[in-house]
Image (spheres, helix red, strand yellow):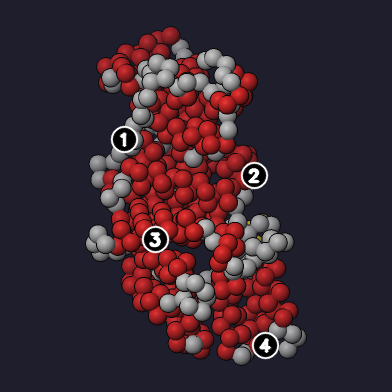
């Protein structure tokens, strides 16, 4: 690697580009050596080496080849014993083309295997892993986050996260690096994990910040890569559209002091118009290609919110119709709760409250928060105040606590 002029020093954009190479680099190592757990550690060490060396020496002409070379060296050092090394190399030479692992010459434009990201996602979302382990391993192995960054994202101590990731890597250590035979059946948990990561980033379940933008951004980045690999899959397009349409409102969701601003009070001029346009195009194209799935329906609902020029102009009857279809696909508590809100907006708060009464109690705060809002709209202020206070005690998000207590205080003591 040679030194380069300042124009080639690492920038945020180039750092993101390097992160995009992680699935390709890790895929090359696992295909050659196996040992997913050790290979993933080696890739992380190569990234650390890059962060230390590139600012001083400049970005190499072929970053992917450099990372593969360094990671391979670290991995072979970790695995080395003369006899074992010789057996591994002989086996690798027999099973794979030589040029799969050879770094291209400087300046060569060699595209990485386009399905490496999806293959890694399938691996990280293996059925034997718990959901929390799937999220952690996805952020670490596919997203390229360090263990400390994953720990911060998941709000657990770094030592706990290190153990969680180590256990997860051991469980998938001997799983072959290839797409599953029936990959379409395994795509659903991959999309669910990306959606969970996005939701935690968009509305943090605990802590002092309403949003963790880097986490939502990482989910969008990974969803884009899956969409690049599977451009004709309508649910992948629907999930990416949903993320873009939802994330488009992020700048308007908090006030100057970080306080929560509800949807109907947001300054829509602060919404990201480019993200909305892209999301609408994605979901429109997906819906035109056949029977809609849950992510497409959620994206269509988000599009109706985003395209409305004001809260009063929102097409709530159409939103309710979409929720009627969605709950037939996914009759979960979140979907039914959101449908109750739509019922209230179309038929009045008392109708919405009647829908809430049909829902099973849930451990979170959202049912109480929605109940409080509908009771306030119905004029039952004392009951609304009690419900706001109950919701505030049941959320670990400080901005949500502040918002709910402020709403309760506005209703007076009585």
Residue 383 shows up from this direction: yes
Task: Describe the element under mark 4 as helix, strand or loop.
Answer: helix
Q: Is 10 on the left or on the right of 280, as rendered? A: right
| Tag 2 near tag 4, CB within 8 Å | no
The residue labelled by disc 1 is 178
- Mark sitting earlier along the chain (4/3): 3
Tell me how far mark 1 sits from mark 4, CA to CA: 59 Å
Neighbourhood count class around disc 4 (C-alpha, 10 Å): few under 14, some 14–19, many 20 upward: some
Tell me how far mark 1 sits from mark 3, CA to CA: 33 Å
The residue labelled by disc 4 is 382
Q: Residue at x 60, y 72 (%)?
A: 265
Quarter of the rendering containing residue 32: top left
> Is residue 72 or residue 1 the one in the foreground?
1
- Mark sitting earlier along the chain (1/2): 2
The residue labelled by disc 2 is 157
The residue labelled by disc 3 is 280
């Amino acid at each position: 690697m040679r030194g380069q002029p300042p124009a080639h020093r690492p920038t945020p954009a180039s750092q993101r580009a390097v992160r995009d190479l992680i699935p390709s680099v890790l895929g090359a190592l696992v295909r050659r050596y196996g040992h997913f757990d050790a290979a993933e550690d080696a890739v992380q060490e190569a990234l650390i080496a890059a962060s230390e060396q590139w600012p001083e020496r400049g970005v190499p002409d072929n970053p992917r080849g450099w990372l593969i070379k360094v990671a391979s060296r670290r991995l072979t050092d970790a695995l080395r014993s003369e006899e074992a090394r010789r057996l591994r190399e002989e086996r690798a030479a027999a099973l794979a083309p030589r040029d799969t692992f050879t770094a291209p010459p400087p300046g060569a434009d060699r595209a990485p295997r386009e399905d490496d990201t999806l293959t890694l996602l399938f691996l990280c979302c293996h059925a034997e892993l718990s959901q929390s382990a799937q999220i952690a391993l996805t952020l670490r192995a596919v997203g390229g986050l360090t263990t400390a960054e994953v720990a911060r994202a998941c709000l657990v101590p770094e030592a706990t996260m290190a153990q969680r990731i180590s256990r997860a890597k051991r469980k998938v250590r001997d799983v072959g690096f290839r797409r599953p035979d029936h990959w379409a059946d395994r795509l659903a948990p991959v999309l669910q994990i990306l959606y969970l990561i996005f939701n935690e980033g968009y509305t943090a379940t605990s802590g002092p910040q309403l949003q963790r933008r880097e986490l939502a951004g990482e989910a969008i980045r990974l969803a884009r890569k899956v969409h690049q690999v599977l451009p004709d899959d309508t649910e992948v397009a629907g999930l990416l559209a949903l993320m873009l349409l939802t994330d488009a409102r992020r700048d308007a969701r908090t006030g100057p002091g970080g306080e929560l601003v509800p949807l109907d009070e947001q300054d829509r001029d602060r919404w990201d118009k480019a993200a909305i346009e892209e999301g609408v195009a994605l979901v429109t194209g997906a819906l035109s290609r056949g029977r809609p799935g849950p992510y497409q329906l959620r994206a269509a609902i988000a599009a109706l919110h985003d395209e409305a020029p004001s809260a009063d102009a929102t097409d709530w009857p159409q939103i309710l119709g979409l929720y009627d279809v969605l709950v037939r696909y996914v009759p979960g508590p979140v979907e039914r709760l959101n449908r109750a809100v739509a019922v209230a907006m179309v038929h009045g708060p008392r109708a919405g409250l009647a829908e809430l009464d049909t829902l099973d109690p849930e451990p979170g705060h959202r049912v109480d928060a929605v109940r409080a809002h509908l009771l306030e709209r119905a004029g039952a202020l004392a009951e609304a105040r009690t419900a706001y206070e109950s919701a505030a005690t049941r959320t670990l998000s400080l901005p949500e606590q502040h918002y709910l207590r402020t709403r309760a205080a506005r209703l007076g003591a009585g």
